[in-house]
Image (tube, rainbow, N blue to C red):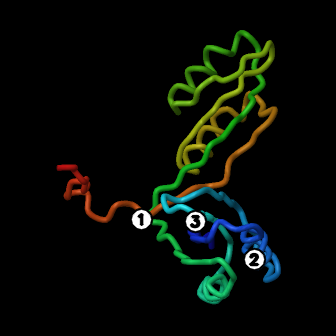
Amino acid sequence: MQHTLAVIVENKPGVLARVSAMFSNRGFNIHSLAVGPTHVAGRSRITLVVDAPELEQLKKQLHKLINVIKVHELDPNQVLEREVMLVRVSCDVAARGELRDTASLFDAKVIDLADNSLTFELTGAPAHLSSFLDQVRRYGIVDLVKSGRIAMKKTSDLSQPAKTSVGS
């Protein structure tokens, strides 16, 4: 079963290497990994998607690592997930209109045009990107690159307005 973990760490050299080594040393494959700064200076967030039957022991081991501050397993029913994808699709001039129509249904942007291909940029949930690939696969995928998945917990109460601070 795939699990999404959000790991808050101190932004120090070697932290990512220690975190990823912990998974590989225990025989777990990391399907996706993304790292970036948080809103707190000096901290980064590592988002990992791993295939593991049970994560309790892994989470305990993560907590023991130097520079790890917090570990959260994100509930798949309460998560916002996004990836970025660039995909080059084979296409002759006659098929461009049809391919662009398909792309517009998925909000994919054409970012490069060649004589025999179109390159698209697409951002969305992993299932959205997968559906786009299913639609364009028949044209022939020439090249594909995806970012690691980023994720955060959904807002728990959408009925309350967002809190803002107003200066006096």
Q: Of label 3 and label 2, which has the lower sequence position?
A: 2
Q: Which mark is residue 23?
A: 2
Which of the two marks, 3 or 2, is nearer to us in this view?
A: 3
Which residue sits at x=66%, y=23%?
A: 111
Which residue sits at x=66%, y=29%?
A: 120
Q: Is label 1 in a helix, a strand or a loop?
A: loop
* Residue named by callout 1: 78
| Circles 2, 1 touching at the beta carbon (< 8 Å) | no
Among the 4 quarters of the image, the one containing residue 145? top right
* Residue named by callout 3: 43
Percent across and percent down for residue 69 are 57, 78
Percent across and percent down for residue 82 are 54, 50
Q: Nearer the viewer, residue 55 or 131?
A: 55
Dot 1 amino acid type: Gln
Which of the two marks, 2 or 1, is nearer to us in this view?
A: 2
Dot 3 amino acid type: Arg
